[in-house]
Image: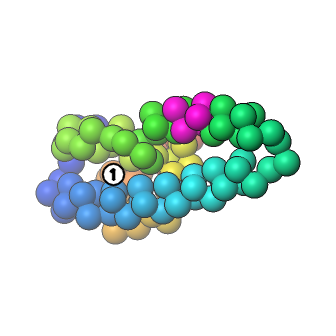
Amino acid sequence: MNNISKSDWQLFNKLLPKWQERYINRLNQEYKKILDSDDSPSNKFWKLEKRIKADRKSPGVMVEVSKRSVFQTLLQLILEKVITDEDLNGFSEELRDGIDDVVKRLG
């Protein structure tokens, strides 16, 4: 679905930074748990390094923003639990239905 409306595009650009901040805050809380664990300092360091390396690839952290990729990015954000269906409130019904259809097919 590459035909993104102007209003969907504008809303996406407005909300994406907020979603990313919320997601990164959640990651930071998870990182704190790693650091607060009873593990050895070196094990904590390497667990955290591995985790951050993996998390950097998430669209909740870093994503290429383009109008052509809005649908795919929203789908990834939903599938990776960066955002929920409720976060799509305000987007066009067509876009939300398209996302829902793909999510249902993926199970």
Residue type highlighted by circle 1: Leu
Front-most of residues 93 and 11: 11
Q: Residue furthest right?
A: 38
Q: Main secondary structure of the magenta part?
A: helix
Q: Position of residue 14 (x, y in %)?
A: 26, 64
Is residue 52 shown in magenta?
yes
Quadrant assignment for the N terminus: top left
**x 52%, y 60%: residue:** 25
Q: Position of residue 32 (x, y in %)?
A: 66, 55
Q: Position of residue 74 (x, y in %)?
A: 39, 47
Q: Residue furthest left?
A: 6
**x 24%, y 58%: residue:** 13
Above or below: residue 34 compared with residue 93: above
Q: Which region is colored magenta? A: 49-53
Left or right of residue 48: residue 96: left
Q: Which residue in the structure is indicated by mark 1?
A: 95
The answer to whether residue 63 is seen in the rendering is yes
